[in-house]
């Protein structure tokens, strides 16, 4: 009985020692600029091994992760050199997503895409060369992970800014054309009214000029008639007076 208890204690000690020095043997899951799909299932925490040997120190490595949803925004990672001898550290580095895009189908969220940038810096490498990179993520549903050549989050931002600028330019052009067309219509209406006014003034002048001429002619005729009448009266009166005085 004592021997069985001793064996049991030895077995527990050996089991604890093995569990504390667990070594993860994993194949490389993701290659440079490649893409994979990981079936998460009911497990929340999953990790992949990425071949980072083609990246130099100081390079930035871009990832795009698409899942049904994310439990946490950040992902945890660390570099190491031997793919057959990896033991997770107690304190892993982590990064937050630089951008997030979502897709909906009839108002229901169908997928979430997050973009991450991991720098192969001396701070993250330490004394390692960083041939391999392990990434821990916390997602739901099937997860698609892609190593992209460029920072697609930045590209999306630039595209959005470009679209906004194009829309703004189009709106400015439309407003300018509308205003120019409106000013042209106003000028046309003003010129038409001015021409019409000039025509009215000319017509009024044409109607007034003959009246002035007729009045002047009438006045001249009256004056001439009066002068002739005065002349005749003076001549007759003078002649008659002289004749009468001569024969008196």
Image (cartoon, helix red, strand yellow):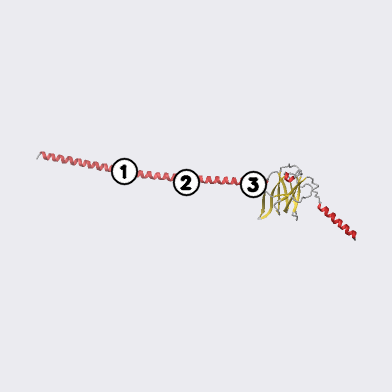
Numbered tag placed on residue 245 in the rendering: none
Residue 177 pos. (x, y %): 53, 45
Residue at mark 3: 157
Label 1 crowd (10 A; few <14 / some 14-19 / many >=20): few
Residue at (53, 46) in percent of width and height = 175
Per the image, label 3 sits on a secondary structure element best described as: helix
Residue at (55, 45) in percent of width and height = 172
Per the image, label 1 sits on a secondary structure element best described as: helix
On the image, which quarter does residue 224 sit in? top left
- Of the image marks 3 and 2, the number of the one nearer the N terminus: 3
Residue at (38, 44) in percent of width and height = 201
Residue 167 pos. (x, y %): 59, 46
Numbered tag placed on residue 186 in the rendering: 2
Residue 188 pos. (x, y %): 46, 44
In the picture as drawn, the residue positioned furthest to the left comes out as: 248
Q: Is residue 166 left or right of residue 111?
A: left
Residue at mark 1: 212
Q: Nearer the viewer, mark 1 or mark 2?
A: 2
Q: Is residue 72 above or below residue 33?
A: below
32 or 110: nearer the viewer: 32
Q: Nearer the viewer, mark 1 or mark 3?
A: 3
In the picture as drawn, the residue positioned furthest to the bottom comes out as: 1
Q: Are marks 3 and 2 in contact (CB under 8 Å)?
A: no
192 or 141: nearer the viewer: 141
- Of the image marks 1 and 2, the number of the one nearer the N terminus: 2
Per the image, label 2 sits on a secondary structure element best described as: helix
């Amino acid at each position: 009985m004592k021997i069985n208890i001793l064996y049991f204690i030895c077995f527990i000690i050996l089991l604890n020692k093995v569990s504390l020095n667990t070594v993860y043997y994993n194949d490389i899951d993701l290659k440079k600029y490649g893409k994979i799909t990981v079936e998460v299932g009911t497990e929340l925490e999953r990790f992949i091994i990425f071949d980072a040997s083609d990246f130099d120190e100081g390079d930035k490595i871009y990832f795009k992760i698409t899942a049904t949803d994310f439990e946490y925004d950040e992902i945890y990672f660390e570099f190491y050199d031997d793919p057959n001898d990896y033991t997770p550290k107690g304190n892993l580095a982590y990064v937050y997503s630089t951008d997030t895009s979502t897709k909906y189908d009839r108002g229901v969220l169908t997928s979430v895409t997050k973009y991450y940038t991991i720098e192969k810096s001396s701070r993250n490498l330490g004394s390692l060369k960083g041939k391999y990179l392990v990434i821990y993520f916390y997602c739901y549903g099937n997860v698609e992970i892609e190593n992209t050549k460029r920072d697609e989050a930045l590209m999306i931002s630039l595209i959005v800014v470009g679209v906004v600028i194009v829309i703004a330019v189009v709106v400015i052009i439309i407003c300018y054309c509308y205003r120019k067309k409106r000013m042209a219509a106003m000028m046309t209406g003003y010129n038409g009214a001015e021409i019409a006014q000039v025509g009215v003034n000319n017509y009024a002048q044409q109607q007034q000029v003959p009246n002035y001429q007729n009045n002047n002619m009438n006045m001249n005729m009256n004056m001439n008639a009066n002068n002739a009448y005065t002349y005749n009266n003076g001549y007759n009166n003078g002649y008659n007076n002289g004749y009468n005085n001569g024969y008196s």
